[in-house]
Amino acid sequence: MTKDTIAAIATAPGRGGVGVIRISGSNLLPFAFALTGKTPRPRYATLADFQAADGSTIDTGLLLYFPNPQSFTGEDVLELQGHGGPVVMQMLLARCLDLGARLAEPGEFSRRAFLNGKMDLAQAEAVADLIDAATASAARSAVRSLQGEFSRAIGELNDELINLRMLVEATLDFPEEDIDFLKAADAFGRLERLQLKLAEIFDRAGQGKLLQSGLHVVLAGQPNVGKSSLLNRLAGDDLAIVTPIAGTTRDALRSTIQIEGIPLHIIDTAGLRETDDEVERIGIERSWKEIERSDVVLLLVDARTGVTDSDREILERLPKALQRITLYNKIDLAEREPERHDEVDGVAISLSAKANRGIDLLRRELLRIAGWHQAEDVFIARERHLRALATAQEHVAAARAVVEGILPALELFAEELRLAQHALGEITGEFTADDLLGVIFSRFCIGK
């Protein structure tokens, strides 16, 4: 890792009462003196003038100094807290670059913190997840991961794997006593308990992944079946124009709502039909692209006519693996009651978006499809965490197949446990390729 000095604006772009520039490197006291003419006291706020090269004042604010290793990055860190105007911040950043710092890359502060052992990889990712949290539940879960709850759970699994590996590999030197020795040490019971704990953590991480990324829901159907009315009802605002004229919506409209803390990214699409209108045709093409990228599609039909031949054509074109719910809208006009029922090709719900009837049935069905269940100990997780946990589960299951006699070689038992431990190590960064680190931290903010 390079030891050069890096600097970046740590606050969001735009105007604000306070703006912060963060600097990290080695031996930053001379840097602070050149910038302010003062030698700051560690971990105390020092009022200072931030000076240009000619001695004039760029801004007046607070200077904070955190000496290594007691800092965010594990290096010397300076924070310049000035007025939050974009011009002032850029002038101050330019002065820092003139003094020898270079502009930090995205996520470079957090990457240095990880490489210097200030946090593991799961905690570093939780920093970005906390910033990006779309709901209060996601923010609370990200804080749990940032404080190390996820990492501790993985660490406990790792310790159990290590102890089990010690037992198994010790028997390789005494093959005539291997099974009896493992039984006496309760190795098989430990393996079963390890499987159960892995399944529990996988479930908690799966819920955290749902809080982090949410569910992408597309409203589809023919023109004038109430897609825009449903979007407005779910969003609680008049986001889409609603008229009785078919083809009013010509491009995708997006809104994010939350149900039980889960972000739902809802997209209202143009009515799916054949048309000679070039603008509407482009909107319909975009609608199909949105459908292909979605997790759930809500196909709206008019409750008075039911599923028509045109609706069946839409159903046939939907991706086979895509979760779908058929919504019979406008039950207030058809004089029907809200209900949920099963159909041959999936679930159906009768509702009225305009009259606000049956909307709760839809919300509950979306939660069911998402696989959500209420839990207070969820920690934020990402897709790569779930893949690593799934891989660990596969190797532990293979190890169990050995002890049950399906695979006779005890060496395979030890190898499967080693591979499971390696998969868990990828979560916290114990075993991580450099190219993966580049991908992870490149998605962070510049000042993080």
Image (tube, rainbow, N blue to C red):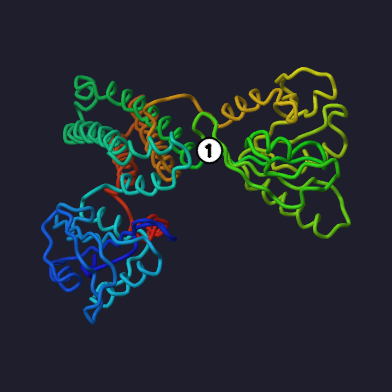
In this rendering, position of residue 207 left or right of residue 302? left
Write down the quadrant of residue 54 in the picture: bottom left
Write down the quadrant of residue 295 in the picture: top right
Q: For the C terminus, give its image quadrant.
A: bottom left
Q: Nearer the viewer, residue 44 or 301?
A: 44
Q: Measuring from the top left, give residue 45's x and y in whole percent.
A: 18, 55
In this rendering, position of residue 361 left or right of residue 38? right
Q: Measuring from the top left, give residue 262's x and y in whole percent.
A: 51, 34
**Residue for point 30% across, 36% down:** 154
Q: For the N terminus, give its image quadrant.
A: bottom left
In this rendering, position of residue 402 left or right of residue 244? left
**Residue for point 63% across, 44% down:** 294
**Residue for point 14% across, 57% down:** 68
Pointer 1: what residue? 263
Q: Nearer the viewer, residue 274 or 280?
A: 280
Seen as rendered, the residue at the extreme bottom is 54
Q: Nearer the viewer, residue 275 or 180?
A: 275
User: Could you say whether the residue bearing mark 1 is in a helix, strand or loop?
Assistant: strand
Q: Measuring from the top left, give residue 193's x and y in whole percent.
A: 31, 23
Mark 1 residue type:
Pro
